[in-house]
Image (spheres, grey):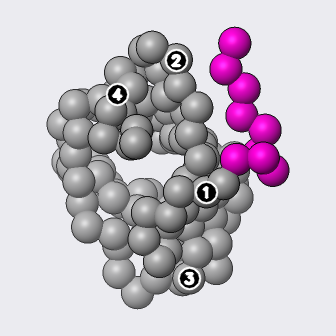
Amino acid sequence: MSILKFDEVPYEHVNERVKRKLIHTENLMTVIVDFEGGPWPDADPPHNHPHEQTSYIAEGEIVFYCEGEPDQAMKAGDMFAVPPYKMHSIKLLSKTARLVDSFNPVREDFLK
């Protein structure tokens, strides 16, 4: 059994605005992503990946951008899904936000 006790696992600092903690099995990854320094004047650069993704907004407010879809203002309690290879991004509207992302298959690029 894999366990992550939040207070016992350090964050991985992705950049000055983003840090994360993750847990995974062979086929599924869950990532807690904390965003700070908001509100941001611009969105993060759009990106895509071959993984299916679902995201739960645990705290804060964002704008979610997804290729071919209307921009969505979202807040804590809202969720979104991203199909493989679809360009997407967020912009932080609040001071901070926490997203809980799930990926299938595991994002090997997130592993050390």
**29 versus 93 height, above or below:** above
Residue underneath mark 2: 25
Q: Assign a secondary structure to mark 2.
A: loop
What's the CA distance linking mark 2 and mark 1?
Answer: 19 Å
Q: Main secondary structure of the magenta part?
A: loop
Residue underneath mark 3: 37
**19 versus 17 height, above or below:** above
Residue underneath mark 4: 52
Please provide percent x and percent y for residue 109.
30, 41
Q: Specify the quadrant of the image occupied by residue 100.
A: top right
Query: Of the residues shown, which amino acid type is indicated by label 1?
Result: Tyr
Please provide percent x and percent y for residue 96.
64, 72
Query: Of the residues shown, which amino acid type is indicated by label 2?
Result: Thr
What's the CA distance linking mark 2 and mark 3?
Answer: 31 Å
Can see residue 50? yes
The answer to whether residue 55 is left or right of residue 9 is left
Query: Of the residues shown, which amino acid type is indicated by label 3?
Result: Gly
Precedes in sequence: disc 2 or disc 1: 1
Q: Which residue is drawn at the image coordinates 58% and 32% (left, top)?
A: 23
Residue underneath mark 1: 11
Q: Which residues are magenta?
A: 1-9
